[in-house]
């Protein structure tokens, strides 16, 4: 015999009598002498008071206090059964997961009772929402077999008249060929959490084997043979990669134009599509790989632009000028990013690594542009990162402390009597230097932050400075303390989207126009709030807040009641 249709539990807030009546109605049984009879009919005929409860549930007026005749009781029972069939479905819409709601709708439609068409429509609409959510979870998990099963389930729902979000279904279908093309992953990191104040080199990655092809880059003497750059909107657009001087040799320009056209042609079919966005998100790197690489090449004190100049471009030039994440020996350590890293190329690479790894799940996957984006001319398709952000849980902004007024003390620039001091600082040489590595002062960081807010993702500011790095080291410390707190508080009073700087003025004009002047104030306020919240997290030493924002940490009741989490 087929198993009985699933029944949803009564609402948690129901009174005991109401819960008993609802359970009785859903299970089709009652205790005592009436255990084998229909609960509504039995209650109506006996007039034992339960019909008042059922009448409230199915929105029927209670019977009069005059003893009901058998005929009136039967009429009331019929009306109650009709309404109860609809109301059970209405409660299922409110409280039940997809499988139970699907089963309850099938049971209601197969009962032969008259159903409220509006409620049936609400049930199908709710099923569409739940089915879309399950499909999105499968997309974020980025595992081929579960994803294919989720797509099949969603298509089955559509065949049954349930509308699943078309954009999410398209995104899921586009991801399938991407996952099929991915190579097997390397050994996973152990389950656990990276240290907050001390970062250690992962023992499960054999650096000599994995990073052997990269070790010649450790001395920072190797550059790409043809490391030219193309500055869109600049005149002239072709520049030498090392000193940024204009390229004037016609033969070089002609050759580089050919390479640029080939790169653009390679992305032409997918540019601007969900498939391209999912491919880019799949270029995220595991934090255990990130730590092992940085230790192996002792890159802690490198500037981020040096990582591109002395590592990424030299090793990808002979591989078709591909993305770093697509190198054959790197791909096993890549995956679907859950955390988007926003940072300045003029800041230290080690501080970016600390922001990505400190206190993180050891299996976190982060998206870093220098590894995911093709670092060669013709990479326009990779610069639309909104699709990457859409699949991430949160964005972490690396904002390491900068020695000077920003870290010395809380300058109280938010108080009116300190406004003149603030203006003097903004005009100082010290601020001019600091602004080159402050994320909210750099155009592309502002563009990323604006996209984070538009997509309603969590925004986390991380402030820490790596210390104790040296060749052969297996541990480094991450310093925070009062300097980091003061830095975040002081910077919260300096946010000005409109004043963000860029290497190419045309980029600034174009991107700020996309954001829209009407949104500058809202973004300034949101970034200010995020900076101040970051200062509180550092001051209170509650790194679990950042981890929770990244979807990696929950707390027990004991931790909350014990005051660990406020």
Image (tube, helix red, strand yellow):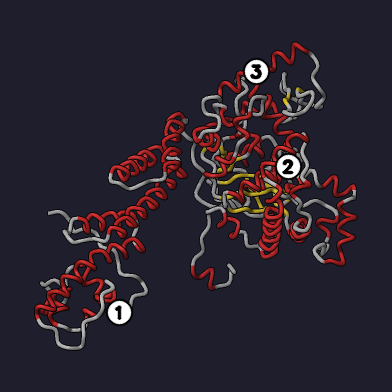
Where is residue 541, by image quadrant?
bottom right
The crowding category of the residue bearing disc 2, from other C-alpha atoms within 10 Å (few below 14, some 14 to 19, many at least 20), is: many
Residue 301 as seen in the image, left or right of residue 153: right
According to the picture, the residue beneath numbered tag 3 turns out to be: 259
Q: Hey, which quadrant is residue 267 in on the image?
A: top right
Q: Which residue is mark 2?
A: 443
Distance in Å between CA atoms under marks 3 and 1: 74 Å
In this view, the mark in front (1 or 2)? 2
Residue at image position (65%, 44%) is 448
- Which element is circle 3 on? helix
Residue 244 point in image, percent of width and height: 80, 27
80, above or below 508, in the image: below
In screen coordinates, is 459 left or right of 23? right
- Quarter holding the N terminus? bottom left
User: Which percent across, then down, holds residue 209?
Assistant: 57, 30
For marks 1 and 2 on the same chain, the one whose residue lies earlier in the sequence: 1
- Inter-mark Cα distance, 3 to 2: 27 Å
| x, y percent for residue 91 | 32, 65
In contact (CB < 8 Å): disc 3 and disc 2:
no
Structural crowding at the residue carrying mark 1, measured as other residues with C-alpha within 10 Å and reported as few (<14), some (14–19) or many (≥20): few
Q: CA distance from mark 1 to mark 2?
A: 60 Å
Q: Which residue is mark 1?
A: 16
What element does badge 2 sit on?
A: helix
């Amino acid at each position: 015999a087929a198993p009985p249709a699933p029944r949803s539990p009564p609402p948690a807030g129901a009174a005991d009598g109401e819960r008993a009546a609802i359970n009785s109605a859903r299970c089709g049984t009652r205790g005592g002498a009436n255990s084998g009879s229909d609960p509504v009919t039995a209650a109506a005929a006996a007039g034992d008071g339960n019909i008042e409860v059922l009448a409230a549930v199915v929105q029927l007026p209670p019977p009069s206090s005059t003893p009901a005749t058998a005929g009136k009781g039967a009429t009331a029972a019929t009306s109650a059964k009709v309404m109860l069939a609809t109301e059970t479905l209405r409660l299922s819409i409110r409280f039940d997961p997809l499988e139970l709601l699907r089963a309850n709708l099938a049971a209601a439609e197969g009962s032969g009772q008259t159903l409220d068409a509006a409620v049936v429509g609400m049930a199908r609409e709710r099923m569409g929402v739940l089915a879309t959510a399950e499909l999105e979870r499968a997309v974020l998990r980025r595992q081929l077999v579960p994803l294919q099963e989720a797509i099949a389930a969603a298509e089955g729902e559509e065949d049954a008249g349930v509308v699943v979000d078309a954009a999410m279904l398209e995104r899921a279908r586009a991801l399938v060929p991407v996952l099929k093309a991915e190579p097997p992953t390397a050994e996973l990191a152990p389950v656990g959490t990276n240290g907050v104040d001390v970062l250690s080199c992962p023992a499960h990655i054999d650096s000599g084997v994995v990073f052997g092809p990269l070790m010649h880059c450790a001395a920072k003497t190797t550059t790409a043979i043809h490391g030219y750059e193309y500055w869109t909107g600049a005149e002239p657009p072709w520049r030498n990669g090392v000193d940024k001087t204009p390229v004037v040799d016609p033969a070089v320009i002609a050759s580089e134009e050919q390479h640029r056209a080939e790169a653009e042609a390679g992305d032409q079919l997918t540019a601007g599509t969900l498939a391209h966005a999912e491919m880019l998100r799949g270029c995220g790197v595991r934090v255990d790989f990130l730590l092992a690489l940085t230790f192996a090449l002792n890159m802690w004190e490198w500037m981020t632009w040096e990582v591109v100049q002395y590592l990424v471009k030299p090793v990808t030039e002979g591989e078709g000028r591909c993305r770093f994440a697509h190198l054959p020996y790197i791909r096993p350590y890549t995956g679907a990013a859950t955390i988007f890293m926003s940072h300045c190329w003029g800041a230290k690479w080690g501080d970016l690594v600390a922001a990505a790894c400190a206190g993180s799940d050891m299996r976190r996957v982060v998206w870093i542009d220098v590894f995911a984006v093709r670092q060669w001319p013709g990479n326009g398709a990779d610069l639309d990162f909104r699709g990457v952000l859409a699949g991430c849980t949160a964005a972490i902004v690396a904002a390491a402390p900068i020695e000077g007024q920003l870290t010395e003390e809380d300058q109280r620039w938010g108080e009116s009597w300190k406004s003149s001091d603030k203006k003097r600082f903004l005009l100082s040489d010290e601020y001019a230097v600091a602004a080159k590595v402050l994320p909210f002062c750099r155009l592309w960081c502002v563009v990323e932050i604006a996209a984070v807010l538009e997509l309603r993702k969590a925004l986390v500011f991380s402030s820490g400075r790596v210390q104790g790095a040296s060749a052969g080291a297996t541990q480094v410390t991450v310093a925070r303390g009062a300097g980091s707190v003061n830095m975040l508080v002081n910077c919260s009073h300096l946010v000005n989207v409109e004043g963000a700087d860029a290497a190419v003025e045309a980029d600034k004009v174009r991107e700020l126009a996309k954001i829209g002047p009407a949104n500058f104030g809202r973004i300034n306020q949101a970034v200010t709030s995020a900076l101040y919240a970051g200062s509180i997290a550092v001051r209170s030493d509650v790194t679990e807040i950042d981890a929770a924002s990244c979807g990696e940490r929950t707390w027990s009741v004991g931790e909350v009641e014990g005051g660990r989490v406020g």
